[in-house]
Image (cartoon, helix red, strand yellow):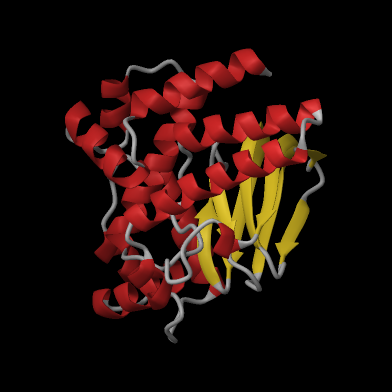
């Protein structure tokens, strides 16, 4: 486990011949921008359990600022975790998961005790396998391929979009209005957006709502129904169904893991 002070800002980069998985375990991170192979992967502060997967030989760069943060870095040989023909995309959504967070905490505890390296290797393999299973469920193959298409948005437009969407996650904005503000037709905007972010504008907004929900579960005791309404979901059931589809578990499971994290640190 790594503990690092990022008060003055930090830039992380990966380009290992092995696969790398990075798990945020806690601490204060006020600003984060992550790019893998030229495709934007995450924006805004992460929640505990948020995972980034960096394929072998990939160009991963991240800029962050905050206070003291704790994270886990696991390097592994991909072919020891998945079959050779299994597609494992770079994590596009940046979701936290209670299941992955629990597995990460077990790895952390073993590392802290300096236990048998074979035990650590088995736990790390379990963690990586769980992650791969989750990413394959999210059907991001097409999104990753779309991110390699030409005609991406300018960096200034990307920053405007990220900040605007993050500030209007209650649903009080229109994708067409955002395209007009950038001087683009809706069709051109959607095409360039998908090439830049690896997903459609609508999917991106839903993903950011899920990430905001996880941060709210971390920082508040708000009832899940109130939380759902505050983020533009029509009901508790709508929020839960969307969350389960994206993350692979219900919101309450993540909240329970956060409670365990608080008592174990």
Between residues 78 and 66, which one lies in front from this camera angle?
A: 78
Between residues 134 and 13, which one lies in front from this camera angle?
A: 134
Residue 221 image offset from top left, x and y in percent: 43, 15
Residue 136 image offset from top left, x and y in percent: 37, 57
Q: Residue at x 68, y 36 (%)?
A: 119
Residue 13 relative to residue 132: left or right: right
Residue 76 image offset from top left, x and y in percent: 66, 57
Quadrant of the rendered image containing residue 242: top left
Residue 13 relative to residue 258: left or right: right
Q: Residue at x 47, y 57 (%)?
A: 162
Is 177 rendered above or below residue 67? below
Is 156 rendered above or below residue 202? below
Quadrant of the rendered image containing residue 109: top right
Q: Residue at x 74, y 57 (%)?
A: 12
Residue 139 image offset from top left, x and y in percent: 32, 61
Tell me if I can see residue 240 in this picture. yes
Q: Residue at x 62, y 30 (%)?
A: 105
């Amino acid at each position: 486990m790594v503990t690092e002070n990022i008060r003055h800002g930090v830039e992380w980069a990966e380009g290992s011949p092995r696969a790398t998985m990075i798990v945020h375990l806690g601490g204060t991170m006020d600003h984060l921008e992550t790019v893998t192979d030229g495709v934007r992967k995450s924006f805004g502060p992460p929640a505990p359990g948020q995972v980034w997967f960096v394929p072998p030989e990939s160009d991963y760069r991240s800029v962050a600022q905050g206070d003291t943060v704790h994270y886990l870095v696991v390097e592994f040989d991909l072919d020891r975790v998945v079959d050779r023909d299994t597609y494992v995309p770079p994590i596009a959504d940046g979701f936290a998961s209670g299941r992955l967070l629990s597995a990460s905490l077990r790895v952390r505890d073993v590392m802290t005790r300096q236990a048998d390296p074979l035990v650590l290797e088995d736990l790390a393999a379990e963690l990586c396998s769980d992650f791969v299973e989750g990413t394959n469920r999210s059907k991001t193959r097409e999104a990753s391929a779309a991110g390699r298409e030409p005609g991406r948005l300018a960096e200034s437009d990307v920053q405007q979009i990220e900040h605007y969407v993050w500030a209007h996650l209650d649903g009080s904005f229109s994708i067409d209005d955002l395209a007009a503000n950038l001087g683009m037709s809706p069709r051109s905007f959607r095409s360039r957006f998908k090439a830049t972010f690896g997903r459609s504008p609508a999917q991106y907004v839903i993903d950011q709502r899920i990430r905001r929900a996880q941060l709210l579960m971390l920082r508040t005791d708000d009832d899940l129904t109130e939380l759902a309404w505050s983020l533009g979901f029509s009901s508790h059931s709508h929020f839960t169904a969307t969350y389960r589809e994206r993350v692979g578990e219900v919101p309450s499971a993540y909240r329970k893991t956060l409670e365990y994290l608080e008592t174990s640190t």
